[in-house]
Every structure is written in C-alpha cells, then in structure tokens.
Amino acid sequence: MSLDVMIVDDSAAIRKILQRVLIQADVPIGKVVEAGDGQDALEKLKTVTVGLILSDINMPNMDGLQLLAALKSQEATKGVPVIMVTTEGSSNKVMEAVSLGAAGYVRKPFTAEQIKEKLAGII
Amino acid sequence: MTHDQLVTLVRQSTRDVFGTMLGIELVDHEPSVGDGVPGPNTGVLALIGLAGAWAGSGTFSCSAEMAQKISGQLLMMEFSAVDADVLDAIGEITNMVLGNVKTSLEEVLGPMGLSIPTVIYGRNFTTRSVGKSNWTVVPFECLGEVVEVHICLTPSNERQRSLSAKDHASAVLTMAE
C-alpha cells in the first residue's frame, strides 16, 4: 500500500532530494505534496490528506516547529507522523520538536540510510 | 572564539556536507584572516546571518561554473546556466554548511539564530561589511577549482542581541548592493 507524503521545505532542491531519497529507501510512496513553508503546508492540508510529513525547521512565514504545533492541535492532522529534517541540530531544538510531538529528527546533511532508519519504526 | 577554532568548525562542516550530499571530497587550502568582507567579485555568493550572544555572517562563494557543477551533483542533473534551481541549491548547501557550524558554536556560545540564505549571482559586485570585524576565510579545492567559506563572528552588544539573524544578513547585503 502506498503512502502519500508531504515535504515541507523552502528549498526546492531539498524537496526534490527528499523525494529521491524516499524512493531510494524503498518507501512505497504514492502522492507527494510539496509546501514551501508552514503556512503553505497548513493551507494544502485543508484539501489533501497525507500519511507522513517531512518538514524543515528554518523557513519563512511559519517555521517547522510552529507548523508541528499547529498540526498536533488539529484533529485531522494530529495523528500524522512528522519527521523534522533540518540543519538545526542543537539539543534544545531537538527537545522542543520531540516535546511538540515530532516522530523523528534528521539532521542535514543526511543519507538515504538515515531517512530509512527513521521511517522504519513509523511506517 | 578564535580564528583557528572557526577554521576547524568550518572545515568539518563543509567537508561533511560536500561528502554526504554531493559525494565530493574537498582539499583544504590555507585559511586566512581579512578585514572587510573578502571574496570574489564575480560568480555566486550565498550569505547567511548569525545572531545570539555572538553575532555575524557567513558566506559561501564559488564561480558560476562551479555553482552549476555543485547543483548538478546535488540534484543529479546537468545545468548549463545559473538559474533559479542553481541559486536555490547553492543557498541550501550554504544553509547546511553554516547551520552545522552554528550548531557546533552553540555548544560553546549558547543559542544562536540563523537567517534564511540570500544568494547573489553576477559580475563585478562589491561586498562590504558594516562592522570592522575580521573575517575568517576558509578555502577548499573542489573539482579543480577553489570555493570559499567566509565567516565573521563577534560578541554582541545589547543592541545587536535584539537584532535577528535576518537583520544581520540584510545589513551586509545592503552594503553589497
């Protein structure tokens, strides 16, 4: 069964790379929805449903932690696993993400294997 | 934070990003310290602001041809010109390099903010820093050319602490224009 995925990052390059990495990691992805920031993601989630969200933290308009908090506060999205994929590697950011309900945390730069490992316990 | 410490952090981070994301092994060149924003006046230059108890800016710069090669490696496609995808890719590489430097710096200097990258492409541009801080210049050989990471970091005063990382980046960019 395929998994619809949302990738949230202000870099189009990273969105493309993450799609490629998901395929390399043998994740049975279906539809991929891209968003450039947290606001864009929330807007798109009004009309689409996904089973997994990969999100950056540092983004304009609404960052990844604000997005995570918003997702976990909404009935329709609170059960969707969210993995943060970010350059923000400080322990306080990781703890903040985990306390907000992140299902995983991957630091950039990343390998396909690291993404696969994080997804292993989630999907 | 000394010049040598910054060089070590920049080298570790840059080699890690290029090795993991691009499969490119970098060769260290001799680092230096310069006043004002050093660097090339042509090609692609990406700029990121850092803010916190210490504040400043960092840049990654390379030729237009190298920017196309790096973007090609990252996205597994060929580029024949510096287009929006190339600028985006170079911005993201810079974000990863300086983001990881920032994470290492935070262990010593406390929490810091990182701005969204700004990428400039052109010829005969000039960059100048508002402050008088020294810039640490860390060059590498990459696929037969030299690419450079520059970083400038100084203790903040109270006014500077209230500025966001984005403000710092804008200040340098305004001078560049």
Image (cartoon, rainbow, N blue to C red):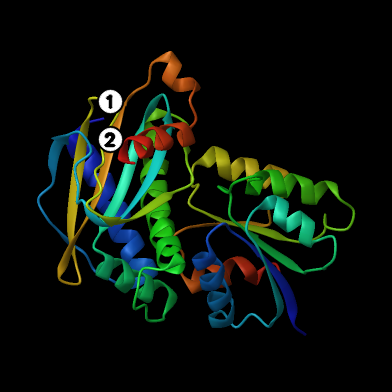
- For this orientation, the residue located farthest to the left is B30
Q: Which residue is painted at 38% across and 60% down in the image?
A: B90
Give percent across and percent down for residue B2.
21, 31
Question: Separation of disc 1 and disc 2 at Cα?
Answer: 10 Å
Q: Quadrant of the C terminus of chain B?
A: top left
Determine whether label 1 and label 2 are within 8 Å by CB. yes
Q: Is residue A108 above or below residue B153?
A: below
Considering depth in this image, is B126 or B161 the residue closer to the camera?
B126
Instruction: Name the chain letter of the residue that bears numbered label 1.
Output: B
Going by the numbered disc 1, the residue's amino acid type is Gly
Relative horizontal placement of residue B26, taking residue A121 as reference (left or right): left
Circle 2 crowding by C-alpha within 10 Å: few under 14, some 14–19, many from 20: many
- For this orientation, the residue located farthest to the right is A75
Please give the residue where the numbered disc 1 appears in the rendered image. Answer: B131
Considering depth in this image, is B157 or A71 the residue closer to the camera?
B157
Relative horizontal placement of residue B95, taking residue B80 as reference (left or right): right
Considering depth in this image, is A21 or A38 the residue closer to the camera?
A38
Give percent across and percent down for residue A18.
55, 70
Relative horizontal placement of residue B117, taking residue B175 as reference (left or right): right
Please give the residue where the numbered disc 2 appears in the rendered image. Answer: B152
Can residue A87 be seen here? The reply is: yes
Q: Which residue is painted at 77% across and 85% down in the image?
A: A1
Marks 1 and 2: which is nearer the front? 1
Relative horizontal placement of residue B52, taking residue A12 as reference (left or right): left
Give percent across and percent down for residue B171.
39, 32
Q: Which residue is painted at 49% across and 67% down in the image?
A: A13
Going by the numbered disc 2, the residue's amino acid type is Cys
